[in-house]
Image (spheres, rainbow, N blue to C red):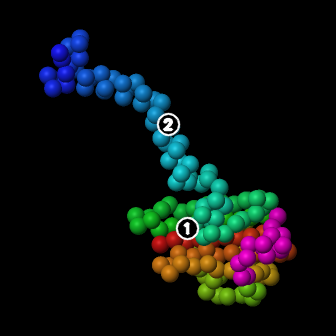
Amino acid sequence: MNSIWNGGSNKNGKSCGSQIFILICTAFPFWLPLMLFCGYQLAGWTNGTDFAPLYERSWGIELSSEWEESCRKKSDTGFQGDGVWYSVYENVSESSIAGMHIPFIKGKNESVIEEFQFVAESAGIGDEDQPDFTKEFIWAKLSEEYGDYLIFLFFPEEERLFLAQAFF
């Protein structure tokens, strides 16, 4: 009786290790793409991932499925997991903003504008996808005790919602 305790060979005298190696090499073209796809879906590693579910999961908010995302960009994640996300949504109505149950504030706040512009610059956003702060808007800011924040800027005339998130 031949067992792994007797040199690790099978009935034909071949090593089990070489058979396992051949099996792994043969299956490699099938399992590697599957693992990469699963990682892509779970972690959202590229800009191809819709940010809405990520905002919803991270901040416990619900974005309307009727909104159209016209701009989406994120910075490279730093060594400590820090980075920024930036999104612009079109066709946003005032009633859908009210349905978010977030306290929006009317009037400008210079520190919020500076933080928003920091995210836009860090993400490499062009002028065409940045808000015009000379127009009327309402804003809200959610923040965590460890420094992460998410800023909402809603421009009712344009029906556009800008989101800027920084995480540290």
Q: Quadrant of residue 1?
A: top left
Q: Residue at point 61% right, 86% down?
A: 111
Marking on residue 33: 2
- One can see residue 3 in this view: yes
Extreme-front residue of the structure: 1
- One can see residue 86 in this view: no
Q: Which residues are magenta?
A: 91-104
Q: Secondary structure at mark 2?
A: helix
Please count the marks in the image: 2
Q: Residue at point 66% right, 69% down?
A: 61
Q: Where residue 22 sits in the image (x, y, percent)?
A: 33, 23
Q: What kind of secondary structure does the magenta stretch mostly adopt?
A: loop
Q: Where residue 51 sits in the image (x, y, percent)?
A: 63, 60
The CA distance from mark 2 to mark 1 is: 28 Å
**Circle 1 Cα neighbour tier, 10 Å, few/some/many (<14 / 14–19 / ≥20):** many
Marking on residue 84: 1
Q: Mark 1 and mark 2 in contact (Cβ < 8 Å)?
A: no
